Image (spheres, grey):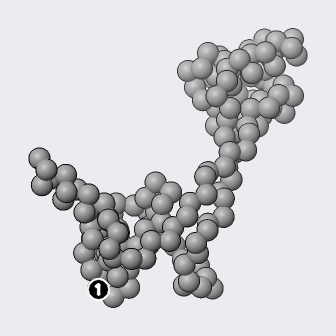
Amino acid sequence: MMCEICGRPIKGKGREIFVESARLTVCHNCVRYGTEVQKKPMQSDRKLAFHPRKEDYEVVDEYPDVVRRGRENKGLTQKELARTINEKESVIHRVETGHMRPSRKLARKLENALDITLVEKMSEPEIVHTRRYSDELTIGDIIRIKKRKS
């Protein structure tokens, strides 16, 4: 088995890591370049060709305008809204001016108080990982090729 980062043969069992959402099998020297995959005790060792989509919730990009319009529609001042959700007035001001992105917890408080939608479901693209042949290029091969050309 070859390391998918440096291209060296892996002695023993390779270690799996995530590098920017890609799952790679690497040698013990290259583990530091990613986050090691933690296996569950009952998980089988077979490799999946398709990984399930990871869904996450994220605050919308236009949150300053959404919060300001929601507060104005309710007829509240920044001070009144802050008191309602048990936050500081400066936090509301920074959110409305875009200087602070609200955490999911704060966003949920604002959603409940103002009847607005700040958090939406985001999904990562599906990653297909089927490389198992040593004749394909690795990141290490590409680096060596670029160094030779220089």
Q: In x, y percent, where is residue 53? A: 66, 59
Nearest to the observer: residue 54 or residue 38: 54
Relative to 106, residue 147 above or below: below
Which residue is at a point 66% across and 49% down the rendered structure image?
123
Where residue 127 sits, quadrant-wise, is bottom right
Q: Who's the residue at 56% across and 83% down the image?
A: 46
Crowdedness near tag 1: few (<14), some (14–19) or many (≥20) residues, C-alpha within 10 Å: few
In the image, taking residue 36 as reference, residue 117 lies left or right, namely: right
* Residue situated in front as seen by the camera: 80 or 149: 149
In this image, 65 relative to 130: left or right? right
- In the image, residue 126 sits, relative to residue 42, either above or below, namely above
Q: Secondary structure at mark 1?
A: loop
Picture residue at 27% right of the left edge, 80% below the top: 9
What residue does disc 1 label?
A: 11
Residue under the point 61% across and 66% down: 51
Could you say where residue 137 lies in the image, as x and y percent from the top left?
32, 65
Residue 86 drawn above or below residue 29: above
Percent x, y for residue 139? 31, 60
66 and 145: which one is in front? 145
Any part of residue 80 in sight: no
In the picture, residue 26 is in which quadrant?
Answer: bottom left
Amino acid type of disc 1?
Lys
**Residue 12 in view, yes or no:** yes
Image height of 23 relative to 41, above or below: above
Q: Looking at the rendering, which quadrant does residue 103 occupy? A: top right
Task: Please count the marks in the image.
Answer: 1
Q: Position of residue 97 (x, y in %)?
A: 61, 15
In which quadrant of the rendered image does the N terminus lie? bottom left
